[in-house]
Amino acid sequence: MTLLHIALYFGVLSLLAFGGVPSVMPEMQRIVVESQGWATPLEFVQLFAIAQAAPGPNILIVSLIGWKAAGLPGAIVALLAACIPAGALAWWIASLWERFKDSPWRAAIQKAIAPIVVGLILSGGYVLCTPSTPDPRLWAIAAASATVMVMTRINPLWLLGAGGLVGALLLGGCASQPNYDLIVASVDRTAADRQNDVRRKPAEMLRFIGVREDMTALDVSAAGGYTTELLSRAVGPTGTVFGQTRAPDPRQRLALRKRENIISIVRPFEDPAPPGVPLDLVTLMFNYHDFGHLGVDRAKMNAAIFRALKPGGIYVVADHSGRAGTGISESGSLHRVEEAFVIQEVLAAGFRLVGEGGFLRNPQDPRDKETPEAGQPKDEFVLKFVKP
């Protein structure tokens, strides 16, 4: 399904790209970041920068986005979708255009298209200068580059080099993707957490979520803080992770984690997010089913999480899979919930489903007991949603 979406989106965009890829940058960013969640705002800008710096046409960005969304097949599909429809249309238009080369309406169309293309490219520049929130440093770099290009004959390669150097000095703290395997292998993690790793596959989970440095995250129903600590290590010292519990923990398990970027908060499940803090990520790990027998208003909770997330923000729900048709009715007995039921409830809050992790699945689990027969792991689903 992801490959089909890639082909559809980039095929349509290719037909609208008057003036090249920069002219459709706003719509591309809306699809890639806000609608499909294939990249974060900052990652989108970084992919564009790589494509521009690399030799070849600027259409290369679509292959990078395709690779980010679906690996090598995604890169191939994206590139073909961006080239074939536009190439076929250009071939047909070229012969038609030449036939009417002396027509006055051809000249009129060319004059009308020029300012439209300029406007589209300027809007693309705005998107690139505002990867998440407007940053005056990015605007300053863009303005200086434009001024030098207009007033001098300096080779653009020098500008790329100078811009990269200035960007490194001014934006050295920009977010990056951490090494998840090294995080899991950290020697100071507890023995209990390492034992949980066998079942929870934390490196795969972090990679599926796409946690990056500088993120502001919320771990709903944090309990002992297994996921909370993993997130805190992944977002780094410049990121923040809120660990939410419904009531004060007498054992102070989050405090015992001794992570400076973990903030413990006590809030109701129906409104779990810290007030006034825009979030990049919310996780709810293996506790959605409990909200059934606990009587939590899940619609209110999902709506509150939706409001708390930034546009393009990620909401990840993982839980023990229930049988088809059971909904959340077995939450108190088998501690399971039907995957389709969770998807339906979360989508109702306005989210889009953008990924399903298969690394915790066990199709051999009959799902009719709380714990399968000895030696079998539970069948568990992991769902990734994004706020459009």
Image: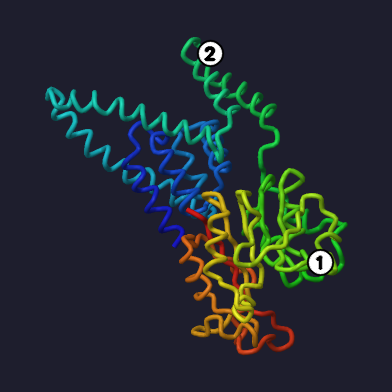
| Mark 2–mark 1 distance (CA, rounded to whole Å) | 56 Å
- Indicate the amino acid at tag 1: Asp
Q: Which residue is mark 1?
A: 193
- Taking the image as shown, residue 227 lies to the left or right of residue 252, namely left
Residue at 72 percent of width and 52 percent of height? 234
Contact (Cβ within 8 Å) of mark 2 with mark 1: no
Residue at 52 percent of width and 52 percent of height? 38
Provide residue 204's location: percent of width, then percent of height.
67, 62
Identify the image quadrant of the N terminus.
bottom left
Q: Secondary structure at mark 2?
A: loop
Provide residue 325's location: percent of width, then percent of height.
49, 84
Q: Note whether 263 is above or below 374 in the view shown.
A: above
Examine the image and state in which quarter residue 54 appears: top right
| For discs 2 and 1, the disc positioned in front in the rendered view | 1
Residue at 57 percent of width and 38 percent of height? 46
Q: Which mark is residue 154?
A: 2
- Indicate the amino acid at tag 2: Ile
Q: Note whether 195 is above or below 60 in the view shown.
A: below
Q: Note whether 382 is above or below 165 in the view shown.
A: below
Q: From this viewpoint, which residue is outermost toward the top?
A: 152
Camera-side residue of 206 and 347: 347
Sequence order check, earlier mark of 2 and 1: 2
Q: Secondary structure at mark 1?
A: helix
Residue at 24 percent of width and 26 percent of height? 112
